[in-house]
Amino acid sequence: MTSPIPVAVLGATGTVGQTFIRLLADHPTFRVDEVAASERSEGRPYGKAAVWHEGTCPDRVAALTVLPVDPDRVTAPVVFSALDASVAGSVEEAFADAGRVVLSNARNHRMDEDVPLVVPEVNAGHLDLLARQRERRGGPGAIVANANCAATVAALALAPLHEAFGVREIFAATLQAVSGAGYPGVASLDILGNVVPWIGGEEEKIEAELGKILGRLEEAVVTPPGFPVSVHANRVPVRHGHTVCLSVGLKHPASPAEAIEVIDAWRGNPVCAGLPTAPERPLVVRKEPDRPQPGRDVDAGDGMSVTVGRIRPDPRLDLRLVAMGHNTVRGAAGGSVLNGEVMARLGLLPVQAP
């Protein structure tokens, strides 16, 4: 039995950082040896620096001293980054240039040409971009990004349809949970009993990222599939669970029954099979007329499955459907952890610092 790979969590005191800590507790592949955060937390025991929001902080991690977010002080060969986008760009580059593998939850490098933007069941093959990125860096360091939380939900729901029938256009409206805004997030007087029809930069991110995730890797370049994507993003008073309402035009029209059969049978890239964080069924089809619902379905597959329902004809395009997934698990920390598990299986991770 091999020893777990030592890892660090950057931005460990925030909402996504805490989710990383929970998911990595007792993990068979990774062991959290270091936590890093901003200057206000630096030097304090993690258990006292982090205001814990869900569950219980593991005792071993609680006793760790919070380090500065600096590759000269954080020595783990693999780092999971929950840093805010305002600082993540240059910091993640510094870690990668120092030879570390950065599994990033931030948006900063998602659209870089040689950075894999990975939802593993959909496009684990895009990890082949690492060869090009490492050649540019001249060492073993690299950045691998997970997708925007709503884009992850949409990409998983669309992938089997795109594989079977070809997607030609997409219209999407998102209903996004408040936990997606971090802590303290959206002011209570703005969101209680309300819908906020704007999330800064969200629509553009989803539109661009879907093209890269569903694109084809050819000669170390991802070529987007070229279909138009139109997105409306909304913040709603739900704690966890992003819902995406989709209307989809297909190159080869399919009936709702055919779509249900394809989605229900889809398991995605077999490289994910049996990994600790991978759900047995990445997509769960509900046939009730009022599902999926965040209040009932958000924890499907321990938060790693996307639930799909209301698959029906569309009078303008071909199909309508609703997809919903856990935004801080599948759409954030869990997505990065699964990326790391796939990379470990493929031998793409260092086991000690360079």
Image (cartoon, rainbow, N blue to C red):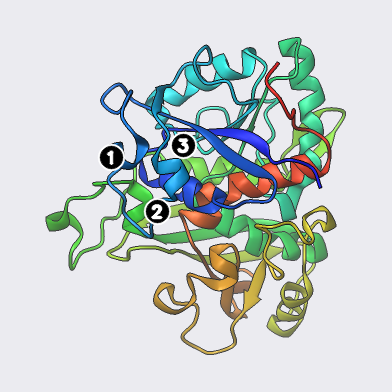
Query: Left or right: 277 with respect to 164?
Result: left
Residue 129 appears in view: yes
N-terminal-most mark, 2 or 3: 3
Frontmost residue, 282 versus 198: 282
User: Disc 2 versus disc 1: distance between alpha carbons?
Assistant: 36 Å
Decide: few, some or many residues near mark 3? Use Cα within 10 Å; few <14, some 14-19, many ≥20: many
Decide: few, some or many residues near mark 2? Use Cα within 10 Å; few <14, some 14-19, many ≥20: many
- Which residue position holds label 3? 82
Q: Are marks 3 and 1 in contact (CB under 8 Å)?
A: no
Disc 2 or disc 1, which is closer to the eye?
1
User: Disc 3 versus disc 1: distance between alpha carbons?
Assistant: 19 Å
Q: Where is residue 256, by image quadrant?
A: bottom right
Query: Left or right: 220 with respect to 298?
Result: right
Q: Which x, y percent locates residue 278?
A: 68, 59
N-terminal-most mark, 2 or 1: 1
SS under mark 3: loop
Please determine whether, in this image, residue 111 is positioned above or below residue 56: above
* Amino acid at pointer 1: Lys
- Which residue position holds label 1? 48
Which residue appears farthest toward the right when viewing the image? Answer: 219
SS under mark 2: strand
Please determine whether, in this image, residue 185 is positioned above or below residue 173: above
Residue 233, numbered circle: 2
